[in-house]
Amino acid sequence: METDLKTVVSLQEAIDDLRTHQAQLHGIPDWMQELHDRHSERKAEIDALQETLDETQAEQRAAEAETADLQTKLKTFQEQIGLVRNQREYAALLQEIDTVKGHIREAEDKGLSALERQEESQKSLDEELQNFAELDGQYKTELVKWEGQKPQIAERIGELEIEVKTLEERLPKAVLGLFRRILDRHENQALAPIQKLQRAGKGPQMWHCGACNYSVRPQSVVEIANNGSLVPCDSCKRILYLPEV
């Protein structure tokens, strides 16, 4: 007859297996992790170059717009020359014109600088994209292969979900409730293996909790081994079990 402890152990194993497959389905498999990391790193570099290029283009457009506004302002001042009434107004107007011309030169310099940096960024981006093409093609090929494996993993997840539900239904509500509370408290690990304490020389056998290393009473070991009793660790409160049983 299967004890509640054996059912709980099987339930924990099924939950572990389910979580592993769920992580596989929504993550990157080990066999393409290195490729994924290299692809992500290179893609981040390309994105940074593209961002720099976008910024220089925006700076150039802003400089061109500023230059256009200043040219309009300069034209207005120049048209006012014929309307001045005295030397004082004429001198003031010339001063305004000179000031605007200075701002125009500054705006044109900013536009030219942005254009030069834009050309450099575009060149670097083109080179990176060319070098990235082979790696990107390899990554897409492996990604297609990975997508082809996902249905099998999804199918296995469905089977494990049924297995977990079936095992839960075998347990008394009180036991299942206890198991779930411990599971939530300890990051989905409600069980702890009992391990023999390695000692030098002769002496009575001693055991400890494999999760928190707290000592386990010999009487508890006997109850678990002979009766399949549900015994919590005195320290971490996980349910103790003997892996060899």
Image: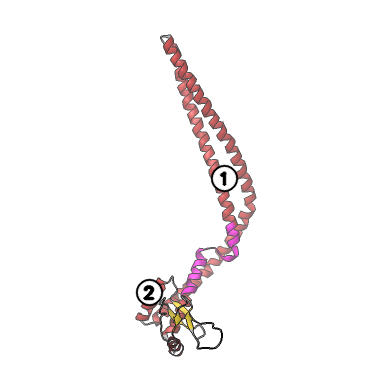
- Identify the amino acid type marked 1: Leu
Identified at 64% across, 45% down, the residue is 127
Image-quadrant location for residue 82: top left
Q: Position of residue 124 (x, y in %)?
A: 62, 43
Image-quadrant location for residue 138: bottom right
Q: Where is residue 50 in the image (x, y as percent from the top left)?
A: 55, 44
- Sequence-wise first label, 1 or 2: 1
Identified at 50% across, 22% down, the residue is 101
Magenta span includes 220: no
Q: Residues within 10 Å of mark 1 (few under 14, many from 20)?
A: some
Q: Where is residue 177 in the image (x, y as percent from the top left)?
A: 36, 77
- Asked whether, in this view, residue 106 is left or right of residue 186, the answer is right
143 versus 75 height, above or below:
below
> What main secondary structure does the magenta stretch of the protein show?
helix
Quick one: which residue is furthest to the top in this view? 86
The disc label shown at residue 181, or none: 2
Q: Position of residue 51 (x, y in %)?
A: 53, 44
Q: Nearer the viewer, mark 1 or mark 2?
A: 2
Colouring mode (rainbow / by chain / secondary structure / one colour): secondary structure
Which residue was labeled with disc 1?
Answer: 49
Quick one: which residue is furthest to the left in this view? 174
Magenta span includes 16: yes
24 versus 128 height, above or below:
below
Callout 2: helix, strand or loop? helix
Segment colored magenta: 15-37
The reply to whether dot 1 and dot 2 touch (C-beta < 8 Å) is: no
Identified at 59% across, 62% down, the residue is 32
- Identify the amino acid type marked 2: Arg
> Total of numbered circles in the picture?
2
